[in-house]
Image (spheres, helix red, strand yellow):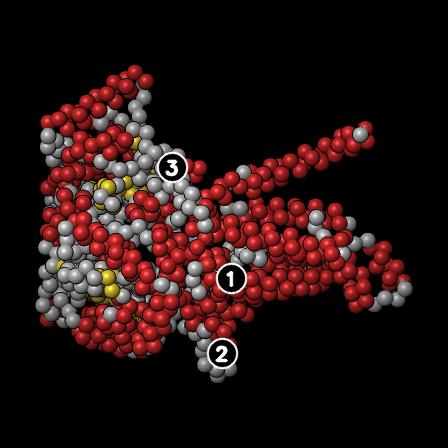
Amino acid sequence: MKNKRKNFKRYIPLYVMAFPGLLYLFINNYLPLPGLILAFKKFNAKKGIYGSPFVGFKNFKYLFATKDAFVITRNTILYNLVFIIVNTIMAIFVAILLAEMTSRIKKAYQSFILLPYMISMVIVSYLVFGFLSTENGFINNSILKPLGMDPVSWYMEKKYWPFILVFVSAWKGVGYNCVIYLASILGIDRSIYESASIDGASKWQQIFKITIPLLKPTIVMLTLLAIGRIFYSDFGLFYQVPQNQGALFSVTNTIDTYVYRGLLELGDMSMSSAAGLYQSLVGFILVLGSNLIVKKIDPDYALF
Amino acid sequence: MKKKIASLLLSATTAAMIFSGCGSAATQTPAQSDTQTTKQEATEQSNAEQKDDGGSSEAASDKAAQAIADRKAKAEKDGKYEKVVIAFFDWTGRPAGLDRINEALSAYTEETLGLDVELMIIDSAAYGEDMKLMLSSGEQVDLFSTCILGYNPSINNGYVLDLEEDGMFDDYCSGIKEKIRADYLDACRVGGVLYGTPPIKDYAIETAAVCVGQEYLDAIGYDVTALPTGELGYPKATWDDINDIFTQLHAQFPDKYVMAIQDNELTQGSSVDNIAGDYFGTLLDPQNSLKIEDVYASDTFKEWAQRAYDWNQAGFISQDALTDTTGASAKVKSGAYMAMMACSKPGYKTQISGECGRDMVVFDVGESFMSSSSVSSFPWCVNQNTEDPVATIQVLNALYTDSTIETLMCWGQEGKEFKVNSDGTISYADGVDANNSEYYPNVLWLMPNPYVTYVWEGDPLDLGQQIADFNDNCTCKSKALGFTWDNTDYASEYTALKNAYDEFGPKVVYGFVDPETGIAELEQALKAAGLDDYMAGKQAALDAWAAENGIN
């Protein structure tokens, strides 16, 4: 008991430091929770959130009632799975390269790789358009034409888009993930590498036998968190980058874009909350589930 | 090790949340404002001097005067006047001179109405989101325009007040009743309840106005005077004439695109009534029949699809047309495009020439038409949460009748923003232009009654009368004028239909696909999305409405 109090006293400065972050978390993520009740009501401003009548699960109907439900769910999950795999591998790859680098230019590389993460998706969509525009695009005019190939109507052909979206997502997201991995790599005790090289381990062996195994907890954690958001899609990526082109819907329509298009004109708050609640509930279950599996395999790596 | 990573992650995610916290709202594009909300810069001078507060019955005006006297007495006691906030939008955000205008307004309304008035002008891109927040969170907004926000959604979400509650409208709005015809007011009733009053403007449209730059026509030596003149004074042309002009333009200017095509072929290029605000189930012959039909299976749509396809094949349309969402007039202004299609009305040539930055010739290819939702597309409404409904509704009445208030709201202050010319029109004050004016909202078509104030230089002094005549003489007035429908019970069908149209519609409309196969694909997708159920729902509501209103 005494020990506990002493510990608490010792941690006071840390609690003080954590306070702004926790306060932010509380205001931003916990205070709005009671509002979820809106998903089961027909919202009416006159009656207010709590006075509006209950309608049961009616607000959820539109998410499942049509044949589109399958397409949007499939797109959302599959794209996110591919993003998780590709972005993780790429981020680790880049992080290891940066960690091995000793020259002073390393900081510049790091900033360049992080830069796309800071760019708004709207701007990204125009960068992509600069490459893919049918009449004035870089690819059609400066690559395909000199090679004597026919121009491609990029925004009307479905088959290219899964690749384009994965590429854009990786280009934009890798920098941020790689910073986290890089920090973990730099946290690894240098003496392990020293003793390994004394024992004659090559760079390759050091990477595969030391760096990656020690990165495993970070990888597992980041992946678990990503799985929690697997039912959300990056709205900007799926709406702005394909320029909202109808011809591409079967490969670009996700839950978020579908809901957005449908509710843009209806402006129905209850139905948007229903979609949000559905997405977060499924995400919550997925996180708990995958955490459970991880725990079964190796309790050390589980989040909680 | 693990703890370290966990804390690293926590701080990383918190940082990410801070970055992304406010991002999602910004990526959403605002709802496109109604396509019929074309800009209009004109007013009626003849009414400018009249200042009448209506007063059809003695009792009503007594009540109004009493309410004003009570407020003044209360202000005397409290030392400050109560305030009524009026919200609408413009294209550039809050004007620099807004505080000055509000002061001038309040100084005047303290005398006449016993209250202060504050205009709240929001950028059009933010208006929809901002208003939804303010209306549902209890911030003070008393009167607002439902443009962008949507009239039906505002009613369905419970934002608006029944104007006739406790006989308020009869008691305090006699001026509005004089200015707006009863059938136009009735057109704003939803389920028999009057929630808003329409801005006085052109409710009818002259469909299919093809606008071509004068300089391009001169270059091909086209003689416009050879064409007959339509009722609005514009050259009347057939689609053959237009195709002939386009072919010559393309030959003369191979580097320019001929047509800045938009997805407006049904809204502005046809007399199909998009009943209840969408095209999933329409009246194909709105003047004579109340039968809901599928427009995408109709000959009207097929004709347009074929026309667009022919234009596309002939090279009149940009290959990037589907992805380029720039407005048509901005495209013509850029000089890369030569023609566009819109709908016209009196004074339209001045307006479109201004928007396109060059003299435009307006070819009148269509006919005049007034759709069922034209009057009720964006009425002015009172917030259900308003503190003093009587004060608010008296301000609403004044907006329709008081030239001083309307002048300040539309044009700003004389000598500061505008000057009165010798012929009675107004123009920019000396040293002021569109770029440095401190108050130039440029949304006249949104204003409750821009015809009780001045008209801008270049427009006829009797523009208000011309517009009224244009509305009255409209040849094709929809039988369903005033019908509105709450489609929330069909929200899942609507969402699916909207997505199906977005997937297969624009290709056809922009002429990128053979009409035969394109329309078949679209039809199939719409049917699968539940078009038949949706149409049946609409038809049932329309039949009920027709029976209630004695229309057959």
Does dot 3 land on a helix, a strand or a loop? loop
Type of amino acid at the residue the image marks with label 3: Lys
Q: CA distance from mark 2 to mark 1?
A: 35 Å
Instruction: Write the residue at 75% across / 58% down.
Output: A297
As drawn, B377 above or below B497: above
Any mark on residue A144, and which?
A: 2
Instruction: State left or right for residue B327 relative to residue B232.
Output: right
Asked whether residue A55 appears in the rendered view, the answer is yes
Please, what is the three-letter code of the amino acid marked with disc 1? Thr
Q: Which mark is residue B406?
A: none
Q: Nearer the viewer, residue A222 or B422?
A: A222
Label 1 SS: helix
Q: How busy is the neighbourhood of tag 2: few (under 14 within 10 Å), some, or many (20 plus)?
A: some
Total numbered labels: 3
Mark identifier at residue A47: 3
Quickly name the residue at label 1: A73
Residue at 10 percent across and 30 percent down: it is B57
Mark earlier in primary sequence (2, 1):
1
Where residue B38 sits: x, y (%)?
25, 54
Whether tag 2 and tag 1 are in contact, CB under 8 A, the answer is no
Where is residue B159? Give x, y as percent.
34, 40
Q: Do marks 2 and 1 both belong to one polypeptide chain?
A: yes
